[in-house]
Image (tube, rainbow, N blue to C red):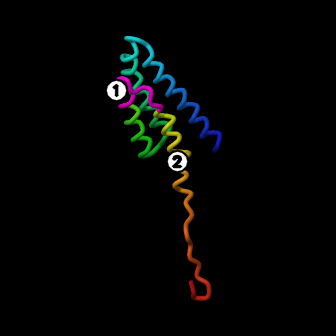
Amino acid sequence: MQNSNYKLLRKGLLYDTIGMITMAIPFVGPFLDILWAPYAAKQMSDMYKGTEGKVASVIVFIEEILPMTDFIPTFTLMWLYTFVWKKEKQGTPQTIEVKVNDRY
């Protein structure tokens, strides 16, 4: 389980790097973004299932298609949200009442 999480991180870092490289190519970069944006959105929805994956794929599409926003590491941020920040919320302690001899 832990290894597959880091495999997603490596894949996300690669996709973020590709997205940033297209910004660095003069004149051709914006046209590459037109091709890259739908592919990146599809990859995001394949990597993260459910509603969160769909929302992230829309965000990555918009981020890649808009000029000068390619520096945002959307795939890495989604990985952090899924495996770091979201887990912190789930780990909050809960109080459980136990009934002993008809008392609480």
Quarter occupied by residue 32 = top left
The question of residue 76 being in magenta is answered with no
Type of amino acid at the residue the image marks with label 2? Trp
Where does label 1 land, which residue?
66
Residue at point 36% right, 21% down?
34
- Left or right: 51, with 87 as reference point: left
Where does label 2 land, which residue?
85
Label 1 SS: loop
Label 2 SS: helix
How far is mark 1 from mark 2, CA to CA? 27 Å
Residue at point 37% right, 11% down?
27
- Left or right: 20, with 104 as reference point: left
The question of residue 66 being in magenta is answered with yes
* 10 relative to 31, above or below: below
- Left or right: 103, with 38 as reference point: right
Pick the quarter of the image with the C terminus.
bottom right
Image spot of residue 23 (x, y percent): 42, 19
